[in-house]
Image: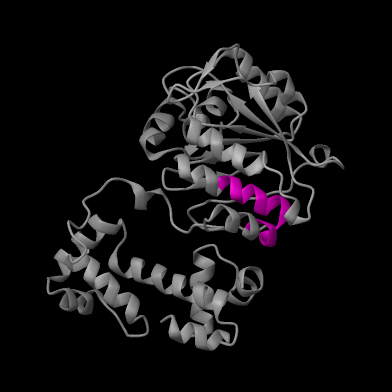
Amino acid sequence: MPRETATTRSQARPLPASSTPAKPPLVAILAYDRLCMFEFGCAVELFALDRPELGVAWYRHAICAAEPGPLRGTGGVRIEAPHTLAMLRRADTIVIPGWRDAAERPPGALLDAVRAAHARGARLCTICSGVFVLAHAGLLDGKRATTHWRYAERLAREFPSIEVDPSALYVDEGALITSAGSAAGLDMLMHLVRRDHGPRIANAVAQRLVMSPHRDGGQAQFVPRPMPSEEASPIAVLQDWLRAHPRELHTVASMARQAAMSARTLQRRFKDTTGLAPLEWLTRERVAIAKELLETREALDVEAVADLAGLGSPESMRRHFRLMGLPAPSRYRRQFG
């Protein structure tokens, strides 16, 4: 499967033959004391619900206690996990929700269990600070990984052999998949569904969850930064105007004139607001418009889509799609139209 986006840093590979039995794959979801309930709930929602309407062999699941109880979750919830770490010996995929404290070394039994699972070919997936479990187990040495932007510096400092990508929503290294903050865990889990069952099934699951089957962009758009104090701020007004006029020839100078500010001020305020330079943001918006047209306007040919989105020619549109890690426009339409 090709890389999805530059910010997801996907390098999808098929599951090893030894971990694809005839019966539905088994997903083990870890639980431990002081469990992050949102991330745990995301994994349960994806893998523990029956989905007969999809017409595929959906996953089996097992909730596994990583340590003796009682186990407490955020908000005072008590958790009774029906399985122990022994279940990891059979699991095809293991989901590790956010670890309770990035400064705390996980128990030795947990580290041994994930090492053994990895050695036999299981797929290990972490959400947010769950990456520290794999890091302490030594499984990410020499590999790329991500985590919540709040923990990225610590991860890089404490584990210098890991290539930490603080901008990615998730990083797919085949049998090791790491994701950023809580909601990015859903992006990563949907990516697993897409890997295992293809885009049609992933789209159907996303519709049921009322979420996008795939988000563009990275964590930079979510890092706290000064935002417009009101909807009518000059940057917000400029963005709305650019979205309404994607076909026009825009430069930093013309954007600055439209916003009634100097080019230098525009670039600084735009970067503070969006995390992107003005022309970079505009290109992403044009690609987003093109994607929507490909998904919803079947009667439009590729040339018309490129023109309406402000991307010029089909060749230019294909290049921008490729730079963002997207399939070629015609293939994108077949997958998501």
Q: Return the residue found at the far right.
A: 22
Measured as percent of width and height from the top left, residue 108 is found at 59, 13
Is 236 or 70 nearer to us in this picture? 70
Is 152 or 206 nearer to us in this picture? 206
Is 202 or 10 nearer to us in this picture? 202
Q: Is residue 337 above or below residue 101?
A: below
Tell me where residue 262 sits by quadrant.
Answer: bottom left
Tell me where residue 80 sits by quadrant.
Answer: top right
Query: What's the magenta region?
Result: 188-202
Residue 177 in sight in this render: no
In the rendered image, the quadrant that contains the N terminus is bottom right
Q: Tell me if 275 is positioned left or right of 310 in this view.
A: left
Q: Is residue 234 above or below residue 188?
A: below
Measured as percent of width and height from the top left, residue 131 is found at 52, 31
Q: Is the stretch drawn in magenta largely helix, strand or loop? A: helix
| Residue name at image x 78 percent, y 28 percent | 90
Measured as percent of width and height from the top left, residue 269 is found at 19, 60
